[in-house]
Image: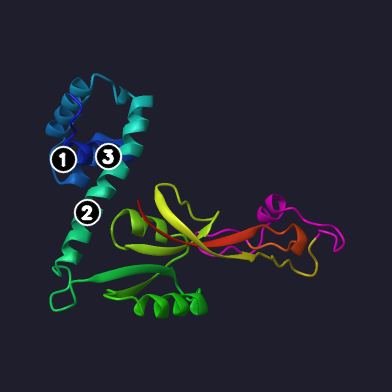
């Protein structure tokens, strides 16, 4: 049987992420025995072993790894469907316009580009109200996948665009800054992979900052992305 229930996926995800039936049961707010039985029933229905159980604990099999990844995507899609449905009906914010588009952007970024986009969109017939939702570095992808946002401004290659429709808006060069006493000679071009491993400033959850000759610097592409 190929059908999976949301409840089964949530049970399995809890065990797969905790790698401990007791902690997973506590996280789910249920007793351990029925959780164990539910996972065993799921394995029988799928015809594969999802977990390796021994005295040292629990680990994922190859099949379990696949279900963990696929299950996350499936649960995100279900959550996104519910959130977007509620937003379309105005149930998420009573009294607000029903036709509302949520745009996720990195906080304090893209001011000029964002204003141009908003102005151009507002000029379109029947344009929906746009709610700009500031996000942390590299959070836009998760917000799109779980339905908190409908569209986002993302950076490639730092943000994954897998599974999204996207449109390239602009490409900008990247530079990096090193302290004056850094061992890299001034006349030597510093490749990005090497620079990125230097013990220097990193923005939260983002790429490292390193000094690179402009001719050799990677280029960051800003894309407008939305779920396929």
The quadrant the N terminus occupies is top left
**Residue 219 lies in quadrant:** bottom right
Contact check, label 1 and label 2, Cβ < 8 Å: no
| Circle 3 Cα neighbour tier, 10 Å, few/some/many (<14 / 14–19 / ≥20) | many
Percent of width and height locating residue 170: 56, 66
Q: Residue furthest front?
A: 125
Q: Which residue is mark 1?
A: 7
Seen in the picture, residue 201 relative to 65 is either above or below; the reply is below
Disc 2 target residue: 81
| Residue 61 seen in render | no
Q: Secondary structure at mark 3?
A: helix
- Place of residue 133 in the rendered image (x, y in percent of width and height, measured from the top left): 35, 71
Residue assigned mark 3:
13
Q: Range of the magenta residues?
A: 183-208
Residue at disc 1, secondary structure:
helix
Image coordinates for residue 205, horizontal then vertical, percent: 50, 59
């Amino acid at each position: 049987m190929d059908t999976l229930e949301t409840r089964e996926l949530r049970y399995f995800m809890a065990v797969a992420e905790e790698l401990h039936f007791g902690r997973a049961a506590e996280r789910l707010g249920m007793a351990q025995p029925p959780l164990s039985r539910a996972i065993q029933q799921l394995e029988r229905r799928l015809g594969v072993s999802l977990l390796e159980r021994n005295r040292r604990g629990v680990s994922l099999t190859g099949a379990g790894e696949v279900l963990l990844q696929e299950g996350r995507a499936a649960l995100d899609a279900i959550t996104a469907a519910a959130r977007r449905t509620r937003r379309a009906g105005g149930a998420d914010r009573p009294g607000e316009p029903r036709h509302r588009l949520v745009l996720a952007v990195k906080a304090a970024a893209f001011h000029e580009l964002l204003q141009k986009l908003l102005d151009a969109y507002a000029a379109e017939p029947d344009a929906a109200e746009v709610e700009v939702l500031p996000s942390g570095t590299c959070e836009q992808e998760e917000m799109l996948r779980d339905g908190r946002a409908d569209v986002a401004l993302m950076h490639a290659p730092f943000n994954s665009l897998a599974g999204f429709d996207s449109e390239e808006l602009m490409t900008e060069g990247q530079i990096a800054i090193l302290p004056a006493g850094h061992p890299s000679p001034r006349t030597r071009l510093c490749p990005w992979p090497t620079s990125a491993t230097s013990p220097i400033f990193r923005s939260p959850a983002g790429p490292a900052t390193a000094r690179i000759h402009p001719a050799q610097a990677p280029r960051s592409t800003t894309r407008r992305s939305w779920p396929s």
